[in-house]
Amino acid sequence: MKLVNPSPALHNEDLAPSETRNWGAFSIFNVWTSDVHSLWGYYLAASLFLLCGNFFNFIIAIGIGSLVIFFLMNMVGIAGVRTGVPYPVLARASFGTFGANVPALVRAIVACFWYGAQTSAAAGAIVALLCRNESINAFQQSSHMLGHSTLEVICFVIVWALQLLIIQKGMETVRRFQDWAGPAVWLMMLLLAVVLVAKGGLSFGSDIPQDKLLAATADAGVPGTPGSFASLAAVAATWITYFAALYLNFCDFSRYAPDEATVRKGNLWGLPINLLAFCLVAGITTTAAYTVYGELLLHPDAISAKFDSWFLALLAALTFAVATLGINVVANFVSPAFDISNVFPRQIDFKKGGYIAALIALVLYPFAPWNGGAAHFVGLIGSTMGPIFGIMMVDYYLVRKGKVDVNALYQENGEFKFNNGWHANAFIALVIGGLFSTILPNFTSLLPAWWGIYGWFFGVGIGGGSYYLLRNMSK
């Protein structure tokens, strides 16, 4: 749409409503292949499989979780199609024209953590390949810096730098890259599974001893023994929470789709169908690797590093590294690029915002806050964004009935000015939701131990509910 006199403090070319709508269902589908088909995605899926205890439980837990993800992504995706605006601009409707900078920066900071985690995983795939050489492996064992081996640091910096090349020409380059990277890793995943099944036979996890499962899942922070109802519920919740960041900014991509039907079709194939298939392959690969090597290997690069064939090991390492670059660009570069640009639209465009996010991830690397249990990391990071999602979706669907004056989103003195650009009701709800989603469960012992696993859900419900009540009370 054509904007009328947008404020320079709220507008630049990258933040404006999208005019080019050339993302078809295949490109939307590949947003999800790029987002999930990564070393971290595999690690999480394999970890959750062990918590389920067997394939039947795994299909139920992941299947239910994937359907919920599909429903939620359609909600925010449709908002993106209708308005054509990125996440930080859409947030102005609920948080105010300038207040939206707060949820934008929260999302940007989370992206920086994930950016570092995914880059570290991709670098790890290269390290695992290189360590097949005895001399390099000796160097890996003997030389250290910044809390990591020197080889890990070198590979991290190289992978980190390569990602910056992908975004040089903006979102169209992102689309072309993900359309190639997503299918590529599917082929590699299938090859990995076929090689292992050919060696050890098809296994569904029933031959893995209970003590092995308990040892492998001890640090996951999930209650109950593998296969119990408590574990299955936690698996579904963790899988849903894994996408917490993209619930907020999927509109960064859906705004380039021509219509709502395209988004729904791409989401249908990319979410419940693709997610379940990917998780099944991850489960088959993990159990087959146990049969072949006698170890529970949750990282595919650790599996491929054991291949006798150098060619297969090289192909696997490069494919997983490229796939991980794909998720970083899609989930952890695009969002903070828009988010940081939204805070300083005059000074920072899409590219500069992304560079800043990448630099923060580089600074975080020596501390590696992403190391540890997959489920715990996902829950802690995801819970911070639950209240924001609840507030935005309540505002868009319940308060505004799915209709927003897009032009007013770019006006300092328009409908979304509220109190000097800040909406007090949204921030009160954000504090209340964040208290129960993140602060109390993670930094106090006032709530039961299992609460943190469902922190994102409590954040959505309490944050969104509080916002709705406050809006009605202020009428």
Image: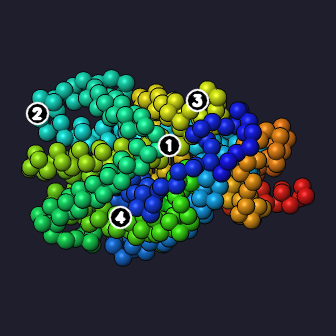
Task: Kindly check if marks 3 and 2 are in contact, taking CB atoms under 8 A apart as contact.
Answer: no
Q: Is residue 154 left or right of residue 80?
A: left
**Image position of 121 with respect to 357: above or below:** below
- Relative placement, left or right, of 451 versus 138 is right
The residue beneath circle 4 is 279
Q: Is the residue 151 above or below the residue 277 in the image?
A: above
Mark 2 element type = helix
Amino acid beneath label 1: Val
**Contact? badges 4 and 1 (CB < 8 Å):** no
Between the C-alphas of marks 3 and 1, the distance is: 14 Å
- Residue to which mark 2 is pinned: 134
- Residue at 74%, 65% (x, y): give it: 401
Which residue is rendered at x = 71% and y = 33% of the image?
9
Pinpoint residue 72: horizontal percent, then vertical percent. 57, 64
Residue 62: x and y in percent read 43, 68
Answer with mark 3 or mark 2, whichever residue precedes in sequence: 2
Q: Tag 1 or tag 4, which sits nearer the N-term?
A: 4
